[in-house]
Structure formats: C-alpha cells, structure tokens
Amino acid sequence: MEPVIRAVDDDFLALPRLALADAALSAARAAGAEYADLRVHAITTQLLHLRDGELETSVLDRQIGLAVRVIVGGTWGFASHAGLTPDVAADTARHAVGVAVTLSALNSEHIELADEPVHLDATWVSDYRIDPFSIPSADKVGVLEDYSGRLLASDGVDHVTATVHTVKEQTFYADTFGSSITQQRVRTQPVLEAVAVDADAGRFESMRTLAPPTARGWEAVVGDEVWDWTSELAEIPDLLAEKTKAPSVVAGPTDLVIDPTNLWLTIHESIGHATEYDRAIGYEAAYAGTSFATPDKLNIMRYGSPIMNVTADRTVEYGLATIGFDDDGVSAQSWDLVRDGIFVGYQLDRVFAKRLGKDRSNGCSYADSPHHVPIQRMANVSLQPGADGLSTADLISRVADGIYVVGDKSWSIDMQRYNFQFTGQRFFRIRNGRLDGQLRDVAYQATTTEFWNSMEGVGGPSTWRLGGAFNCGKAQPGQVAAVSHGCPSALFRGVNVLNTRNEAGR
C-alpha cells in the first residue's frame, strides 16, 4: 500500500513559532550570546493497559513548552518555560545567558560547534498512515479486548496483559545561524503477554508477542497489514504450553542462531551504547558508565568477525530514532560504526564532532522534553545483512547441536558495555540442522568482542527486521529516548550458555 503523505498538525502550526524564535534569539544576542537556539517541543502520550481483558490503566498526557540554549564565552546556558509568548521567550533567553555567565567560572572546556548548512523553513513528518490520536480510546480498548479474548479463550492460558503505548512528538527549532525547522513524528508500541500458571509446582511461564515498537501509527495495531496478529495470537497458546513442559537447558559452550527479535537488544547494549562518543570519553561515567570502545581504538580495534558491518542511521524507514533533523539542527544521516569487523565510527552531536576533529556532526542530539537539555542520543544502530542471501533455515542447517533464540527478555551488561548476559522469550533446540522442540531457563553470556568475533554467518535481506525500545535511558536528570535496531538472523559459534534456574539456586 502506498504511504500517506502527512502534514504537521494545524494546532502546532498555529503556534507563534516565528515570533517566539525572533524574540528569543534577539534577546539572547542582545544579552551577549554568541550563539542561541530555540526549541518549541510538544509531546502527547497515551498508555492503555488491560489485564485479563479488563481496562486497568488509561493515561493521556500532553506536555508543551519552549527551551533556549545559548553559548556565552564558550559556556553553555539553558533555560525553559511552559509559556509560549514572545515575552516569555525573551525572558527565558536572558535567563539562559545568565546561567551561562554563572557557569563560566566552572567551565574547563571552550564549547564550539561543528559546521552545518542552514536549513531554512524545513519541514519533516514521519511516515505513518493512521494518527493513533485520531482514534477514540474506546475503539483502541476494543482492539485490545479482542486480542486478549483470543488468548484467554485458549486452554492453558491463565492470564493475559495487553498494552499499547502511543506517542506524538512535535518540534520547532530555530538558531542564530538561520535554520528554522518544524517536525512531527508518531510511534506505537503494542504488547500482549500470556501467562500459564502451574499451581501444583508453584511456578509460571510467560510468552510475549514479537511485534516491535515502530514509528508507525495505529495501522501497526489494528488488522494484519503491518503485523500478522491473527497468526501470532493463534500460535502463542500452543507455544506457551510446549514451553511449560520443555526440558531445562544444559549449560556450556553452545552454537546459537539468534533471531532479529532477540539480537536487536544485544546490538543496543553492546554496540549502540558503546559507540556513543560522550560515553567513550567519560561524560556518562557517573550515571550509566563509560565504554570500552575508547578513541584510541578507533580504526584499530577488531570489534567482531569480518562479516560484521554495523551502521548508525537516522533515515531508516519506520525507525524510532529516524528524524529529519536533530535538536542541533543537523540533517539526518547514515554512517558506519563497524566495517568488516573493524571499529570505525562514533555517534556525535555538534560539540563532540568538533572535539573529535570532524567537519560535521552526524546528527545525534536529542532532548526528550522542552525542559531538558539536548544531549547526544543513539541513532538507529543496525547490523547489516549478508550479501549471499542466507535464510534463517540456512543458518540453522549449519548447526549440529545448538539453540535458536527468539524474542527479547531480560538483560545485564557492565558499565563499560563489555561483559553481558541476555535471555529471551523462546528457545528451540537445534539437532542436526533442524528445530527439535523448546528449551527453558536459557541465558547467553559473553564479552562484547568475544561474542561478535564468534559470528560465523549472517542472514540475507529477507531475514532483516527492525526491533527497538521506547525507553532507552541516559543522563542526569534522566532522559528517555526511543530507538530502533535492525538486524538479520545470525549464527554464533561456541557462546557460553547458562541455566538460569541452576544459577538462581533452584
């Protein structure tokens, strides 16, 4: 189906955007700023949650405000306000200048921005078909009730939760270089989980749907056009019943074929965060750790096997971190992080691009609220498929005794993004190149470079899928960003597998 060409909503366009920009930027210059930018930022969110077919949570929230950043004498200043009048914008700009002047005595680094072309009167809208906020809440609840009922009607399913989280984000950006940019994007996250309880044994098993969060609209939830809900909801009860009776895994080195529905999270934690430049030079050390991928390793370190090619991409279709322009006014791009297994790139904003000696930022600045400072955030970081067009079945056929891992669940990684452990939703034993029933209690464990160097095969484009998350956290005060990660199915040799039940002492 052809995409719908959408426009920014009229209510956002009706805001006095140009007047706010003129007031804020003029006041900042008059107060002594050598650079200033204004961001008008509106975020509308809705969360609907059902338990056993009954509505449990319904929350609709809208936040809007303006933010002004300035540079005075090489020092950042920032201020924000919920009011959207020219007088408020001017006062906020003067306040930001005052903050910069106050902080200048503490600043040890002269702030400079990498160059960027001027983007005048630019507009960008994400590619969604049905605005989720145009659908009555009762209709949304009705869809979740229907999906929940299909699962609850099946033998062996004792409980079902159903959740849909939708977001519409609108921004206007203007700076003293002359850029002025208006953007709107939508994202949707539907999840259903079925639970089977074994009262006699005192334990339970669960299984979630595999539909990823996506930069699509309501079309990702209703009907089977985007995701085949009919098939997956019909399959889950049987898969869950099999899981409850499956044998526990035998720990030890194991060949793994990992599905994109699981591998995206490993990419996020072990590559996405590790290649954030601010983390690599220690700016994140107090909150979320640093990175083993330090600048001295750039263009030298073997991150993984020669078939490993990883890109950062702000342009990929339906990516959660896809945008026209970032919060530094930099246009979206795609670039290499790992090429032929070698670590070759970082994710950068305009300040860190200048610090690294780059001519231009690759567009990784983002703030999750009008009241938060833009910081360097992750692009859609993705493992590229192989050119030989292997299917998932082809990869499985190469394994004599191993495990096929499907769906994400819990994870753990150290503060340098090096030692990690991941579990999943579904695990299938591989015997002699074929699937042979499910396993339970599986986790895989490795160091980042050990794991990616063990990758022996990657699937072709037909296996490539986008996964992702709404809730990537970073910074102090904490900020949350949505990001997608694409990847094919992939084959890894000799990865250490743990039995989680034994590890827990059960």
Image (cartoon, rainbow, N blue to C red):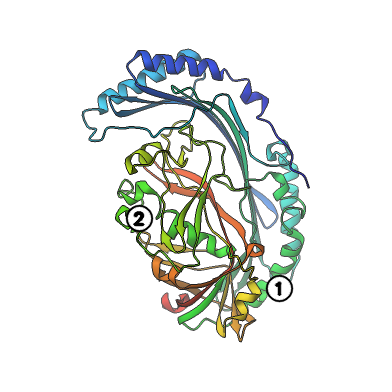
Tell me which residue sits at (41%, 32%) in the image: 115
Q: Give the image location of residue 269, x and y in percent.
A: 44, 58
**C-alpha span from label 2 to label 1:** 48 Å
* Amino acid, disc 1: Asp
Q: Is residue 317 above or below residue 242?
A: above
Which of the two discs, 2 and 1, labels the residue nearer the N terminus?
A: 1
Nearer to the camera, 454 or 239: 454
Label 1 Cα neighbours within 10 Å, binned few <14 / some 14-19 / many ≥20: some
Q: In the visual, does 345 lie left or right of 409?
A: left
Do the residues bearing badges 2 and 1 touch, measured as CB atoms within 8 Å? no
Q: In the visual, does 496 lie left or right of 224?
A: left
In the displayed orientation, state which residue is furthest to the left.
105
Image quadrant assignment for residue 236: bottom right
Q: In the visual, does 48 lie left or right of 228?
A: left
Name the element at disc 2.
loop
* Residue 58 shows up from this direction: no
* Amino acid, disc 2: Leu
Q: Tell which tag, 2 or 1, sits nearer the viewer.
A: 2
Q: Quadrant of the C terminus?
A: bottom left
Res 247 label: none
Residue tagged 2: 298
Q: Give the image location of residue 61, x and y in percent.
A: 58, 35
Name the element at disc 1.
helix
Q: Give the image location of residue 60, x and y in percent.
A: 61, 37
Residue tagged 1: 238
